[in-house]
Amino acid sequence: ASLRVLSLEQSAVRRAWREGLARSATTITLLLCGDTYTAWNKRKRGMAPDKLRAELAFNAVVLRRHAKAASAWSHRKWCLTMAAEPGG
């Protein structure tokens, strides 16, 4: 019975991610603590190429609040690299 509940919870998490709830959770997390590597990584995995400009704008907001957040700077570099690639 507990495996069934776990499976239902995992599918609910997947559904929530698709609906953008997990993205909202990473947004809140990063505004509170800009150096949360896991949250930045989640955002990378769900990133659509046409959303890079919006992601850079959000990253700038986080960096204004947390200027020394190494993970935020690393994410910014990743976004700029993706934007510079052909088709990005």
Image (cartoon, helix red, strand yellow):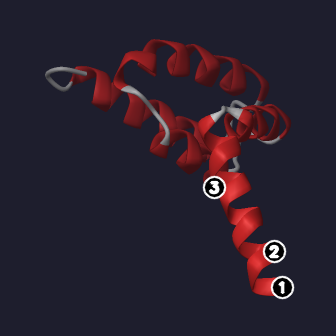
Residue 68: which numbered mark, if any? none
Q: Could you tell which of marks 3 and 2 lies nearer the N-terminus?
A: 2
Give the residue type that dot 2 points to: Val
Relative to residue 20, is residue 12 depicted above or below? below
Relative to residue 24, is residue 84 depicted above or below? above
Give the residue type that dot 1 points to: Ser
- Residue found at x 41% / y 28%: 48
Coordinates of residue 43 in the picture (x, y in percent): 56, 39
- Residue found at x 48% / y 30%: 76
Relative to residue 36, is residue 22 depicted above or below? above
Coordinates of residue 74 in the picture (x, y in percent): 48, 42
Q: In whole angstroms, how far apart are the C-alphas of marks 1 and 2?
A: 5 Å
Residue 2: which numbered mark, if any? 1
Q: Could you tell which of marks 3 and 1 lies nearer the N-terminus?
A: 1
Residue 38: which numbered mark, if any? 3
CB atoms of marks 1 and 2 within 8 Å: yes
Secondary structure beneath label 1: helix
Secondary structure beneath label 2: helix
Q: Nearer the viewer, residue 26 or 75?
A: 26
> According to the image, label 2 marks what residue?
5
